[in-house]
Image (cartoon, rainbow, N blue to C red):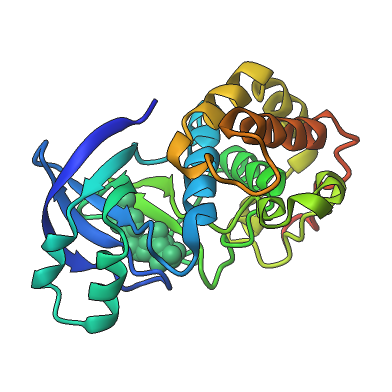
Amino acid sequence: MLREVTAVRYVTPLREGGSMPGLVEGDDHRLYALKWSGAAQGRKALIAEVLAGELARGLGLPVPELVRIDLDPVLARSEPEQQIQEQMRASGGLNIGLAFASGAFNFDPLCFEVQAELAARVLWFDALIGNVDRSWRNPNMLVVDGELMLIDHGASLIFHHSWASSAGWTRRPYDAGDHALGRFVRDLAAVDAESAARCTPELLAAAVAAVPEEYLVDEPGFEGPDAVRAAYLERLGARLAGPRDWLPVLEVGA
Ligand SMILES: Nc1ncnc2c1ncn2[C@@H]1O[C@H](COP(=O)(O)OP(=O)(O)O)[C@@H](O)[C@H]1O
Ligand SMILES: [Mg+2]
Protein backbone atom coordinates (compact mmCIF):
# COMPACT_ATOMS: atom_id res chain seq x y z
CA MET A 1 0.00 0.00 0.00
CA LEU A 2 1.18 3.48 -0.78
CA ARG A 3 1.67 5.95 2.04
CA GLU A 4 -0.95 8.71 2.33
CA VAL A 5 0.07 12.35 2.27
CA THR A 6 -1.99 15.53 2.25
CA ALA A 7 -0.74 18.43 0.14
CA VAL A 8 -0.35 21.57 2.22
CA ARG A 9 1.40 23.86 -0.28
CA TYR A 10 1.69 24.15 -4.01
CA VAL A 11 5.11 25.42 -5.07
CA THR A 12 5.48 25.43 -8.86
CA PRO A 13 4.92 23.36 -12.02
CA LEU A 14 7.75 21.07 -13.23
CA ARG A 15 8.03 22.09 -16.85
CA GLU A 16 10.53 19.70 -18.42
CA GLY A 17 8.00 17.17 -19.69
CA GLY A 18 4.53 17.38 -21.19
CA SER A 19 2.13 16.88 -18.31
CA MET A 20 3.57 19.48 -15.94
CA PRO A 21 3.49 17.69 -12.60
CA GLY A 22 3.25 20.04 -9.65
CA LEU A 23 5.90 20.43 -7.00
CA VAL A 24 3.96 20.26 -3.75
CA GLU A 25 4.77 20.07 -0.07
CA GLY A 26 3.08 17.36 1.98
CA ASP A 27 1.88 17.43 5.58
CA ASP A 28 5.01 15.38 6.32
CA HIS A 29 7.08 18.47 5.27
CA ARG A 30 8.54 16.63 2.29
CA LEU A 31 8.36 17.67 -1.35
CA TYR A 32 6.64 15.61 -4.05
CA ALA A 33 6.26 15.72 -7.81
CA LEU A 34 2.49 15.44 -8.05
CA LYS A 35 0.88 13.74 -11.05
CA TRP A 36 -2.56 15.28 -11.55
CA SER A 37 -5.56 12.98 -11.61
CA GLY A 38 -7.35 15.63 -13.68
CA ALA A 39 -4.64 15.80 -16.37
CA ALA A 40 -5.50 15.08 -19.99
CA GLN A 41 -3.58 11.77 -19.82
CA GLY A 42 -6.17 10.60 -17.31
CA ARG A 43 -6.25 7.89 -14.74
CA LYS A 44 -4.63 5.29 -16.94
CA ALA A 45 -1.38 7.25 -16.81
CA LEU A 46 -1.56 7.22 -13.00
CA ILE A 47 -2.30 3.50 -12.90
CA ALA A 48 0.74 2.86 -15.11
CA GLU A 49 2.85 5.20 -12.98
CA VAL A 50 2.07 3.18 -9.85
CA LEU A 51 2.05 -0.31 -11.30
CA ALA A 52 5.26 0.11 -13.30
CA GLY A 53 6.96 2.09 -10.54
CA GLU A 54 6.29 -0.56 -7.92
CA LEU A 55 7.30 -3.29 -10.34
CA ALA A 56 10.61 -1.50 -10.91
CA ARG A 57 11.13 -1.22 -7.18
CA GLY A 58 10.43 -4.93 -6.75
CA LEU A 59 13.00 -5.67 -9.42
CA GLY A 60 15.58 -3.72 -7.45
CA LEU A 61 15.65 -0.78 -9.86
CA PRO A 62 16.04 2.75 -8.46
CA VAL A 63 12.72 4.62 -8.31
CA PRO A 64 11.46 7.36 -5.97
CA GLU A 65 8.89 6.50 -3.33
CA LEU A 66 5.34 6.70 -4.67
CA VAL A 67 2.59 8.08 -2.42
CA ARG A 68 -1.10 8.87 -2.53
CA ILE A 69 -1.57 12.63 -2.28
CA ASP A 70 -4.82 14.19 -1.20
CA LEU A 71 -5.18 17.62 -2.79
CA ASP A 72 -7.52 20.44 -1.88
CA PRO A 73 -7.99 22.36 -5.15
CA VAL A 74 -8.01 25.60 -3.19
CA LEU A 75 -4.19 25.39 -3.34
CA ALA A 76 -4.54 26.23 -7.05
CA ARG A 77 -5.13 29.88 -6.24
CA SER A 78 -1.40 30.56 -6.13
CA GLU A 79 -0.88 29.29 -9.69
CA PRO A 80 -0.99 32.19 -12.16
CA GLU A 81 -1.23 30.15 -15.36
CA GLN A 82 -4.85 29.40 -16.17
CA GLN A 83 -4.27 26.07 -17.91
CA ILE A 84 -2.38 24.66 -14.94
CA GLN A 85 -4.91 26.12 -12.54
CA GLU A 86 -7.71 24.31 -14.37
CA GLN A 87 -5.77 21.06 -14.23
CA MET A 88 -5.39 21.50 -10.48
CA ARG A 89 -9.05 22.29 -10.00
CA ALA A 90 -9.92 19.07 -11.81
CA SER A 91 -7.60 17.12 -9.50
CA GLY A 92 -9.27 17.47 -6.11
CA GLY A 93 -8.90 14.39 -3.90
CA LEU A 94 -6.56 11.55 -4.79
CA ASN A 95 -3.43 12.13 -6.89
CA ILE A 96 -0.11 10.29 -7.18
CA GLY A 97 3.14 11.76 -5.90
CA LEU A 98 6.78 10.85 -6.39
CA ALA A 99 9.22 11.79 -3.66
CA PHE A 100 10.98 14.83 -5.09
CA ALA A 101 14.72 14.44 -5.45
CA SER A 102 16.15 17.90 -4.85
CA GLY A 103 19.38 18.62 -6.57
CA ALA A 104 18.69 15.97 -9.21
CA PHE A 105 19.55 16.67 -12.80
CA ASN A 106 18.05 15.14 -15.90
CA PHE A 107 20.03 12.19 -17.22
CA ASP A 108 22.12 12.84 -20.33
CA PRO A 109 23.61 9.72 -21.98
CA LEU A 110 26.57 11.75 -23.23
CA CYS A 111 27.53 13.04 -19.78
CA PHE A 112 26.77 10.13 -17.50
CA GLU A 113 28.10 6.59 -17.75
CA VAL A 114 25.77 3.73 -16.80
CA GLN A 115 27.11 0.36 -15.81
CA ALA A 116 26.29 -2.29 -18.45
CA GLU A 117 24.35 -4.61 -16.18
CA LEU A 118 22.13 -1.85 -14.74
CA ALA A 119 21.50 -0.53 -18.25
CA ALA A 120 20.45 -4.00 -19.39
CA ARG A 121 18.13 -4.48 -16.42
CA VAL A 122 16.44 -1.13 -17.07
CA LEU A 123 16.05 -1.88 -20.76
CA TRP A 124 14.64 -5.34 -19.98
CA PHE A 125 12.12 -3.75 -17.61
CA ASP A 126 11.11 -1.16 -20.23
CA ALA A 127 10.65 -3.95 -22.77
CA LEU A 128 8.42 -5.84 -20.33
CA ILE A 129 6.12 -2.86 -19.70
CA GLY A 130 6.39 -1.48 -23.25
CA ASN A 131 7.79 1.86 -22.10
CA VAL A 132 8.14 4.26 -25.04
CA ASP A 133 9.23 7.13 -22.80
CA ARG A 134 12.90 6.32 -22.25
CA SER A 135 14.41 7.62 -25.45
CA TRP A 136 17.62 9.64 -25.53
CA ARG A 137 15.46 12.64 -26.47
CA ASN A 138 13.24 12.17 -23.45
CA PRO A 139 14.97 9.77 -21.06
CA ASN A 140 12.80 10.22 -17.95
CA MET A 141 15.72 9.40 -15.73
CA LEU A 142 17.34 11.55 -13.10
CA VAL A 143 20.81 11.53 -11.66
CA VAL A 144 20.60 11.91 -7.90
CA ASP A 145 23.83 12.05 -5.90
CA GLY A 146 25.58 10.37 -8.80
CA GLU A 147 23.04 7.55 -9.03
CA LEU A 148 20.49 6.85 -11.74
CA MET A 149 16.79 7.11 -10.88
CA LEU A 150 13.84 6.11 -13.07
CA ILE A 151 10.71 8.29 -13.29
CA ASP A 152 7.62 8.80 -15.44
CA HIS A 153 6.11 5.43 -16.36
CA GLY A 154 2.69 6.85 -17.24
CA ALA A 155 2.93 5.99 -20.94
CA SER A 156 3.70 2.29 -20.39
CA LEU A 157 1.26 -0.65 -20.27
CA ILE A 158 -0.65 0.79 -23.23
CA PHE A 159 -2.78 -2.34 -23.53
CA HIS A 160 -5.02 -0.95 -20.78
CA HIS A 161 -6.29 1.74 -23.12
CA SER A 162 -8.07 -0.94 -25.11
CA TRP A 163 -8.69 -4.10 -23.10
CA ALA A 164 -10.72 -5.73 -25.85
CA SER A 165 -7.72 -5.93 -28.15
CA SER A 166 -5.07 -6.31 -25.45
CA ALA A 167 -4.27 -10.02 -25.86
CA GLY A 168 -1.84 -9.34 -28.71
CA TRP A 169 0.17 -6.99 -26.51
CA THR A 170 1.70 -9.89 -24.61
CA ARG A 171 3.84 -10.75 -27.66
CA ARG A 172 4.39 -7.25 -29.02
CA PRO A 173 8.09 -6.61 -29.76
CA TYR A 174 9.78 -3.74 -27.96
CA ASP A 175 11.57 -1.25 -30.15
CA ALA A 176 14.75 -0.21 -28.33
CA GLY A 177 16.09 1.74 -31.31
CA ASP A 178 16.38 5.06 -29.51
CA HIS A 179 16.45 3.85 -25.90
CA ALA A 180 18.53 6.18 -23.75
CA LEU A 181 20.57 3.33 -22.28
CA GLY A 182 21.00 1.26 -25.45
CA ARG A 183 24.61 2.34 -25.89
CA PHE A 184 25.57 1.03 -22.44
CA VAL A 185 23.99 -2.42 -22.81
CA ARG A 186 26.37 -5.25 -23.62
CA ASP A 187 24.31 -8.40 -23.18
CA LEU A 188 20.56 -8.13 -22.78
CA ALA A 189 19.99 -11.89 -23.03
CA ALA A 190 22.29 -12.34 -20.02
CA VAL A 191 19.89 -10.49 -17.70
CA ASP A 192 16.73 -12.03 -19.14
CA ALA A 193 16.60 -15.19 -17.04
CA GLU A 194 17.44 -13.43 -13.80
CA SER A 195 15.05 -10.50 -14.34
CA ALA A 196 12.21 -12.83 -15.33
CA ALA A 197 12.87 -15.03 -12.29
CA ARG A 198 12.73 -11.97 -10.02
CA CYS A 199 9.36 -11.05 -11.48
CA THR A 200 7.47 -13.61 -9.39
CA PRO A 201 3.67 -13.79 -9.28
CA GLU A 202 3.90 -12.33 -5.75
CA LEU A 203 5.93 -9.36 -6.95
CA LEU A 204 3.49 -8.71 -9.80
CA ALA A 205 0.55 -9.03 -7.43
CA ALA A 206 2.11 -6.56 -4.98
CA ALA A 207 2.65 -4.00 -7.75
CA VAL A 208 -0.92 -4.41 -8.97
CA ALA A 209 -2.23 -4.19 -5.39
CA ALA A 210 -0.51 -0.82 -4.95
CA VAL A 211 -2.76 0.74 -7.62
CA PRO A 212 -5.42 2.76 -5.79
CA GLU A 213 -8.82 1.07 -5.79
CA GLU A 214 -10.39 4.43 -6.71
CA TYR A 215 -8.76 4.21 -10.16
CA LEU A 216 -10.17 0.75 -10.84
CA VAL A 217 -13.76 0.87 -9.62
CA ASP A 218 -15.51 2.01 -12.77
CA GLU A 219 -13.40 0.44 -15.52
CA PRO A 220 -15.85 -0.37 -18.34
CA GLY A 221 -16.23 -4.08 -19.08
CA PHE A 222 -15.15 -5.22 -15.59
CA GLU A 223 -17.21 -6.15 -12.57
CA GLY A 224 -14.98 -4.37 -10.10
CA PRO A 225 -11.42 -3.61 -9.03
CA ASP A 226 -10.48 -7.23 -8.39
CA ALA A 227 -11.39 -8.18 -11.94
CA VAL A 228 -9.29 -5.33 -13.33
CA ARG A 229 -6.34 -6.31 -11.13
CA ALA A 230 -6.67 -9.90 -12.34
CA ALA A 231 -6.58 -8.69 -15.94
CA TYR A 232 -3.34 -6.75 -15.37
CA LEU A 233 -1.82 -9.82 -13.74
CA GLU A 234 -2.91 -12.04 -16.59
CA ARG A 235 -1.46 -9.80 -19.32
CA LEU A 236 1.84 -9.19 -17.57
CA GLY A 237 2.08 -12.83 -16.52
CA ALA A 238 1.54 -13.97 -20.09
CA ARG A 239 4.18 -11.57 -21.43
CA LEU A 240 6.64 -12.84 -18.85
CA ALA A 241 5.88 -16.50 -19.39
CA GLY A 242 7.09 -16.08 -22.92
CA PRO A 243 8.36 -16.89 -25.38
CA ARG A 244 10.04 -13.58 -24.59
CA ASP A 245 10.75 -12.77 -28.21
CA TRP A 246 9.52 -9.23 -27.44
CA LEU A 247 13.02 -8.65 -26.05
CA PRO A 248 14.94 -6.60 -28.60
CA VAL A 249 18.13 -7.86 -30.17
CA LEU A 250 20.66 -5.08 -29.71
CA GLU A 251 23.63 -4.28 -31.85
CA VAL A 252 26.33 -4.13 -29.20
CA GLY A 253 28.17 -0.82 -29.13
CA ALA A 254 25.79 0.81 -31.61
N1 LIG B 1 10.74 12.75 -8.24
C1 LIG B 1 11.29 13.76 -8.91
N2 LIG B 1 12.38 14.39 -8.42
C2 LIG B 1 12.96 15.41 -9.10
N3 LIG B 1 12.51 15.88 -10.29
C3 LIG B 1 11.42 15.29 -10.83
C4 LIG B 1 10.76 14.21 -10.18
N4 LIG B 1 9.72 13.82 -10.93
C5 LIG B 1 9.73 14.63 -12.00
N5 LIG B 1 10.75 15.52 -11.95
C6 LIG B 1 11.07 16.56 -12.95
O1 LIG B 1 9.87 16.94 -13.62
C7 LIG B 1 9.93 16.61 -15.01
C8 LIG B 1 8.59 16.14 -15.49
O2 LIG B 1 8.19 14.97 -14.78
P1 LIG B 1 7.72 13.67 -15.53
O3 LIG B 1 7.37 12.67 -14.49
O4 LIG B 1 8.73 13.26 -16.52
O5 LIG B 1 6.35 14.12 -16.22
P2 LIG B 1 5.98 14.53 -17.72
O6 LIG B 1 7.09 14.13 -18.65
O7 LIG B 1 4.73 13.78 -18.00
O8 LIG B 1 5.78 15.99 -17.68
C9 LIG B 1 11.03 15.56 -15.11
O9 LIG B 1 11.64 15.54 -16.37
C10 LIG B 1 11.99 15.99 -14.02
O10 LIG B 1 12.82 17.03 -14.48
MG1 LIG C 1 8.58 12.90 -18.53
Residue furthest top in the image:
202
- State which quarter of the image contains the C terminus: bottom right
Residue 156's spot in the image, x, y percent? Answer: 61, 53
Work out whether residue 102 or residue 188 is closer to the camera in this orientation and state it. Answer: 102
Res. 85 image quadrant: bottom left
- State which quarter of the image contains the N terminus: top left
Answer whether residue 62 is visible to the viewer in this image. no
Residue 14's spot in the image, x, y percent? Answer: 28, 67
Res. 134 image quadrant: bottom right
Res. 82 image quadrant: bottom left
Residue 176's spot in the image, x, y percent? Answer: 72, 59
Answer whether residue 56 is visible to the viewer in this image. yes
Q: Residue at x 65, y 22 (%)?
A: 198
Work out whether residue 245 or residue 188 is closer to the camera in this orientation and state it. Answer: 245
Q: Residue at x 17, y 42 (%)?
A: 6
Residue 51's spot in the image, x, y percent? Answer: 53, 39
Q: Residue at x 67, y 55 (%)?
A: 158
Q: Residue at x 10, y 40 (%)?
A: 27
